[in-house]
Image: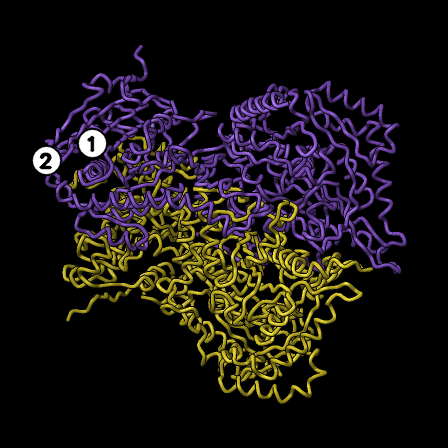
Chain colours: A purple, B yellow
Amino acid sequence: MLPSFILRRLSRPFSLLQVHGRRLFSSISISVPLSHPIYIVWAANTGLGKTLVSAGLASSVLSPASQPSEFQYIKPVQTGFPSDSDSRFVFNKVFDIFRRRRVAGTSLIASNHVLKASPAAAREVVGWYEEKTVEGEVSEECSGSRRRLNCTTLCAWKEAVSPHLAVEREAGGVEDEQLLGMVQSCLWKEGGDKEKAELWTVIETAGGVASPGPSGTLQCDLYRPFRIPAVLVGDGRLGGISGTVSAYESLKLRGYDVVAVVLEDRGLGNDGSLLSYVQNSIPVLVLPPIPEDQSDDLMVWFDESHNLFDSLKRILQSAFSERVQRLHDLPKKAGELLWWPFTQHQLVPQANVTVIDSRCGEKFAIHKVQAHDDVIVQLFDGCASWWTQGPNATLQIELARDMGYAAARYGHVMFPENVYEPALRCAELLLDGVGKGWASRTFFSDNGSTAIEIALKMAFRKFWCDHEAILSISNQKPLEFRVLALTGSYHGDTLGAMEAQAPSSYTGFLQQPWYIGRGLFVDPPTVYMHCGRWNLLLPDALHSEKHELEDLCKNIANICAAFAFRDELFSESRDASTISTRYSSYISKQLSTYSGGPQNKWIAALIIEPGKNILGYLFPFLIHGAGGMHMVDPLFQRVLVKECRNRKIPVVFDEVFTGFWRLGVESAAELLHCLPDIACFAKLMTGGMVPLAATLATEAVFQSFVGDSKLKALLHGHSYSAHAVGCTAAVRSIMSFKDPKKNPNLPPEGRVLRELWDHEVVQKISLHPQVKRVVVQGTLFVLELEAEGSNAGYASVYARSLLLQLREDGIFARPLGNVIYLMCGPCTPPCVCSQLLTKLYERIDEFHKNRTVQL
Amino acid sequence: MLPSFILRRLSRPFSLLQVHGRRLFSSISISVPLSHPIYIVWAANTGLGKTLVSAGLASSVLSPASQPSEFQYIKPVQTGFPSDSDSRFVFNKVFDIFRRRRVAGTSLIASNHVLKASPAAAREVVGWYEEKTVEGEVSEECSGSRRRLNCTTLCAWKEAVSPHLAVEREAGGVEDEQLLGMVQSCLWKEGGDKEKAELWTVIETAGGVASPGPSGTLQCDLYRPFRIPAVLVGDGRLGGISGTVSAYESLKLRGYDVVAVVLEDRGLGNDGSLLSYVQNSIPVLVLPPIPEDQSDDLMVWFDESHNLFDSLKRILQSAFSERVQRLHDLPKKAGELLWWPFTQHQLVPQANVTVIDSRCGEKFAIHKVQAHDDVIVQLFDGCASWWTQGPNATLQIELARDMGYAAARYGHVMFPENVYEPALRCAELLLDGVGKGWASRTFFSDNGSTAIEIALKMAFRKFWCDHEAILSISNQKPLEFRVLALTGSYHGDTLGAMEAQAPSSYTGFLQQPWYIGRGLFVDPPTVYMHCGRWNLLLPDALHSEKHELEDLCKNIANICAAFAFRDELFSESRDASTISTRYSSYISKQLSTYSGGPQNKWIAALIIEPGKNILGYLFPFLIHGAGGMHMVDPLFQRVLVKECRNRKIPVVFDEVFTGFWRLGVESAAELLHCLPDIACFAKLMTGGMVPLAATLATEAVFQSFVGDSKLKALLHGHSYSAHAVGCTAAVRSIMSFKDPKKNPNLPPEGRVLRELWDHEVVQKISLHPQVKRVVVQGTLFVLELEAEGSNAGYASVYARSLLLQLREDGIFARPLGNVIYLMCGPCTPPCVCSQLLTKLYERIDEFHKNRTVQL
């Protein structure tokens, strides 16, 4: 049997998948140097002269008057090989041009390599490596300068067809990641700053912008992680305006920056139309007509194009410099002009500002200033961009296309009394998904905070309608509505949402003088994992009953430990337990204090975040002391719901954070085995692209606003209610996340994501002496480091060094005192999560050892 | 001199620019019938077989087993004419196919017309109209059925080049609107329902999707107002996957629905890649290889393709039926599933629900169910989609592309301590535009309401810092902060924003039990236009001082009347007037009631909407009685600012509605000639595409949050803060609106939009006996109808009939009691505004006459 691919080992320092100075994790970790110009050449179609542009540019870059001394040409994918070889063409032509224009004192060493070829192509390869030299005459004036042209073909196939077909027909398949790894290793050049500054790199794609690569992935998608600035070779022929415009748009729809368009003059003035299309925002350069005669050596044509390629070189050089300059300027300008939320600007020195160049699926690409060279490097976004993010790279591009479509089709259209497809479709999906079995209406707004304000207005009206008779009885005191909520919970930063939160640093007079705190705030029992077991912790409020409960707790703890996983905590079988009865009586007692009476204060709504109490983790300073890393006991939440329902107190689930698979199920209500009257959704709803929120309600809640008068209606709204772009993104995201064909984490017919965080590693972490507690659920992993004194709590910088180390591992996480969390998307492969955890474990261990040594 | 274009008059009922059953206004008013399938055929490039697809489809549609009896083929733009004539090709080929497949009892009458040709092309035209017939043999079984094929070329040029070049070279230019008018008149067919149901129409474009039309406008943009469902003819050749994908994306980026892709089989399996790209969401059909021999009559090829075209016909037929069905279902489903903001659902019968199919610039396309046939009809969106909208059709498509780019490049990336280009660029533009001269920081949030909550938090902190010494003095009463605001103002629906509003129907216990109303609410003096003059109206609160002021008022009224326009009201020269002093003393008196004292209540912020008091117009029920149609006297606002500044009370401008040219200037602060400490922006900021808001602040305000502790920072934030898609849209919109090259309403170097509403028509309306008051400013025109009793006020349905009449004129406005407003975009041509006003005047006059007759 023939080997499916033949790899030529070379003496030159290109090695496969060896990424300089960077560790690989998961898939390849992309990094692109900013030490020298790197461009990628795309074309509107095949046969438009990409290779001529590459060769022309190379000759201009290497021309004696120019600065750079080395030009690197990379052809990642070549079909029709070896009779067609673009790298060989560039190698030969630039050499010929150089010889023709020979200048005293300047010599050129040109080389051409082939790295891999399919068996069929390999059989016909004569030389895997060739090199030739034009020696410049050294005279007294010229000390002699040496220029270098390195041309490389990475993978080649024999048939002159699309690469994915060539793979099908003659084997030699190469995975996307492998190809990216090969390209990446070419981008990194050993050497000092000076040497790097003298380099140019051009990568030439195959066929058109959206032609498939070897794996079938469209090339514009394939190379997207690099997001290298683009030169687009347009089409000067009849019909060529269209193809060029469309190719340009396909590049834009993948987030590429097109720096210049070059096209052949075919006498049709296509450049004029293109310039008008781009509104003169980018240069459109016109090449002289390309001789059709195959025997033409093109030397005259290259002479005619000389000035044009010089212009192109200057354009690309200056775009490169401007980009690097701007990247350097961004942190300073940000520090001067922006006002970040939740941020004490004085504590953020310029050097700590992260410049985000782009994102691709779950990863950021950030600008990193290094000792030797700047770099754009990919990091896993462990914050899921403030808990909103879900898509992988494929879904991101689909969402971009859908959102562009929605913007072009609708822009925004006003919602009240109107209907349009994305809003209705989104409502249908919500009511058939997270609202299934209980909700009948969708009220759209813009973010979690507004969704909560709306939910509370709904709940209060419903409570009023259900209790009108008793509430109307005159009372000396004015009627007051309160919410039942949990200490440490968080529902947003607008005043109405804040009022449903217990007093905290957020709610002090200096933050919001209008805050009163209109809730009955109950300390909940919480659960966490430690040393591989799940523990139950009772709140202070239950301390009085502690003695009685002690035995029960032991019992619970035993059960949890026996099952080792938290699933038992969510089991409905606990409803029959003694602790359930205890919870009931505790809650009843609390509720009785706000059921009218002479104070005329009423609990008119319950609001909880089903399945979590996440702010306890992420903003532990909200919870007294350092004990704020708990998950609320789901049984307690279920009992709360039951007790409120018995009293006709409307139940609001705040699913802003938990909705759409964040906790492993589409709606976290599934974890509690009970349903709300009202629920709020936002964040992941649009896949993490744009703000959009929905408050879902039962028909009974809706009916409490129906009547003859407009004044009975819910008089609340935001201008962009149900905006088409957001609804369109939501439709695509909701459908993709729950479709087992698109979400590999969902088993067929499944309603629960498979476990994303490797059980063994989680256990191992929870057993580590540096780790106090662990909570893991769905896409979320949280841990609290053992810490004492000022090292504990939100204000601590205890974990900062550890998190900086994680960035070196390609993981972006935010230091929150002694709490560390990682969040992935619903489609993130478990192997990626495991790699994250493994890295985390290593860094924790390192951290622990360092601290032990210090002590 | 030759006529630039030769028009052939025809006997067939196609007449130019005569749009059946619809009035034209401004430009052409688009309407597309839904009585029969209409498709538009696009191609990824020129020469891919669009015309073969059209002919094949025609032959399948007309084949004896089929239902429709008539097929209409339209070629709007033909170059290379008459030697190339696609309509003649379809005419001949379908005739030949029919003759070849002759079926007993079925006859075909085929015709081919040419409507217009350039002089050069016209000289060579032999026949402008031709017709031929295949007679079916009538037997005893078949009663004889008659089928009809009408082929039409609308405009033709001789040279086989891009149409825009042909126009340049041989004259015969045709404006976009004229061409659209010609196409539209072809879409409308006289006749009964039965006849219409038997029709199919196919429009075939020229070249590729983005090839320029005769005017140079890209065809995908040119035909966009129709948004006719598309068939895309792909490219089966090498490189064809790329061109097809890109063409598809260009169509999506203009809001088209692609119903099917058809491409020639060139043995490369391109269809497989395309199917995978579209994820099997639309069918990809493969045509047999097209004979290259020019002499081939293609009859065999058409036979081979017969089944494929039958499939295509079925696909298109069923997509058409599904679309019509869904449009019919939408209102019912909307009534069942949606919960509209500010809407009493019981008052919205299903028939009143507007189905919006799309928008194109300032116009909606809505689904209209009519007696004889359903139709998609364009209406001018006089609500500017809830006051958010600004772009024209061109800017909308640019925004769609930019937003697609931003989604693909960034998705959303977390903001705190990070920086990325769109957020920073947006902040730069804001601080250099609406914040110029005073603001130094940008705090992003999601909508006007959150921007206001943030602004108030900022203001309160600033007030605290400026008055800490006195505020810290212990007092028996707890410290209370209040805002100074105007009665009738509106700042949003979250609790914090509501608290800054005076009590109203919105704020009652049943709407928001938590509302207290934490302001000092001052009744402002207001101004309005009546009978061509501007009048000043004093509030009740100033009544006590009325006697003294009477003379002054007369004086003011005289000045206004003398100048006839409201500009004098905004003049700074009024600062020196006696009324200015009076305003000062009135405000001082008010303020003194909330400056600490034993109550310990402080006015800690002023909040106003500079230049307007818009809610007075739009929700007049907020203002006592029916008098709620006033603009606040700008001098009063200026004096308010001055008095507050003197007392170090921070000044907040709510520019959520007024910002970005809504009132004719970029920031309405310019109208007041004074600056705020804090200002809020949203709505038009993104051009009306997606929610995004910004609160701008001075450096002094920012500094009051700077310190050593995180707890001193502004602890407020939303997950999508500064989301990249919104910031990108904002960057493009802000730049476009203020660029005289892109906004024709802005004179070079201009800072004020030219007057959009024709002065004479405005005068005429203000003089009409049915009109009580008029206010006109920037993009806004508002009038209040004379009405009495229950006809006045928000709950009245007085104006409903008038507004329904306006819809017949192509204007979508919302009935708000006896108040009517029209809102355009910053780039809307004044001629369009004038047409709107003229229509409005006519309808008011009609309304008045009808009422007079009734009385």
Chain of the residue under label 2: A
Q: Quadrant of the N terminus of chain A?
A: top left
Give the residue displayed 60% in from the left and 50% down from the top: B706
Relative horizontal placement of residue A219, taking residue A571 as reference (left or right): left
Q: Position of residue B140 (x, y in %)?
A: 34, 47
Q: Position of residue A518 (x, y in %)?
A: 77, 50
Label disc, if present, on residue A100 of the rendered structure = 2
Q: Amino acid at mark 1?
A: Arg
Mark 1 highlights which residue? Answer: A147
Q: Position of residue A659 (x, y in %)?
A: 62, 39
Mark 2 and 1 residues: CB-CB less than 8 Å, in contact? Answer: no
Give the residue displayed 53% in from the left and 29% down from the top: A806
The answer to whether B641 is drawn above or below residue A44 in the figure is below
Q: Position of residue B108 (x, y in %)?
A: 29, 51
Decide: few, some or many residues near mark 1? Use Cα within 10 Å; few <14, some 14-19, many ≥20: some
Q: Amino acid at mark 2?
A: Arg
Image label count: 2
Relative horizontal placement of residue B31, taking residue A783 as reference (left or right): left
